[in-house]
Image (cartoon, grey):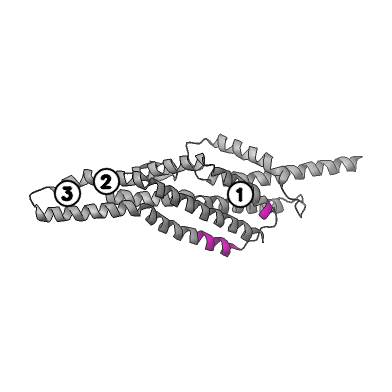
Amino acid sequence: MLSLASSVADLAVEKIELFILALIRISVIIFLLPVFNQNPIPTTVKMAISFLLAFLVFPQMPLISFTIANSPVFFFMIVLEQIFIGLVIGFTTSFLLYFVTMGGEYIARDIGLMQGTMNPFVEFQSNLYSIILTVILVVIFFASGGHYFFIRVLFESFQYIPMGNFIWDTRSFAAILLLLSASSFVVAFQFAAPIMGAIFLCTVTLGLMNRVMPQMQVWLLGIPLKIFLGTIVIIYSMPFMVQLFNANFEQLQRALFAILRAGGK
């Protein structure tokens, strides 16, 4: 009877340890997800969401191929594995909004409004255009249900990379992250290209006007003109920006599943 009770107690302790490991991976991902990684969202809310998702994920986790022994070193190694998996997935999801911030910097630089203010989505100072475009695209993203994909990735990460079966081949992860980084610069330029082109034509026109009418202070006229022209072009370019955002999101989806496959092969 005592041996049976001891076995049941050991099984219960192992289940608790597995739940803690799942909670660690989920918490790291939640804390790094776009929008959720900003300070205005309380830490208690993030932890509550992590606990809820862990309760939902835990019954669907695949059976582990090892037994958690009473060894702190072994448990610590599994904890490090879950943290690293969460960091890789969470950092990859952050590329969803980086190109919007960079594109906004290009736009503000050409228009001439580089005054910085705190951007709550990327946790550093940014210009007004970056913040406004980020808010608009985040609202569209949530309205279209795009956030459900990240919940799906969180669930399927345990199917692709079960606990204790992670492949520590960082070359694949580094290659995918480098490709995403390079792609962010390209997409950011495409994102800002219509506004940059319009401002360039406006600058050329002002230069010609200055040559034709030197007595006219065209550069004083150029400041409000560039702001007005840039705002109008942004409004009319919004469908293109949304389309580019969706294309970048699809690329991010492929990258995330490539990382899951690389980590669990």
Q: Are marks 1 and 2 in contact (CB under 8 Å)?
A: no
Residue 184 vs 20, above or below: the answer is: below
Q: On the image, numbered disc 2 is attached to which residue?
A: 229
Q: Are marks 3 and 1 in contact (CB under 8 Å)?
A: no
* Residue nearer the viewer, 10 or 97: 97
Q: Which mark is residue 219?
A: 3
Task: Point out the image quarter for the C terminus.
Answer: bottom right
Q: Is residue 69 left or right of residue 89?
A: right
> Whole-percent x and y of residue 205?
19, 54
Q: Amino acid at mark 3?
A: Trp
Q: On the image, numbered disc 1 is attached to which residue?
A: 153
- At x 48%, y 53%, the residue is 247
Circle 1 or circle 2, nearest the eye: 2
Q: Is residue 172 left or right of residue 182?
A: right
Residue 88 vs 238, above or below: the answer is: below
> Whole-percent x and y of residue 110?
28, 51
- At x 56%, y 38%, the residue is 46
Q: Earlier in the sequence, mark 3 or mark 2?
A: 3
- At x 44%, y 50%, the residue is 243
- At x 67%, y 47%, the residue is 21
Q: Amino acid at mark 1?
A: Val
Q: Is residue 175 visible?
A: yes
Residue 176 magenta: yes
Distance from the alpha carbon under mark 3 to that under mark 2: 15 Å
Categorize mark 3 by other alpha carbons within 10 Å: few (<14), some (14-19), many (20+): some
Residue 121 occupies quadrant: top left
Q: Is residue 17 visible?
A: no
Distance from the alpha carbon under mark 3 to that under mark 1: 51 Å
Residues rendered magenta in the picture: 159-178
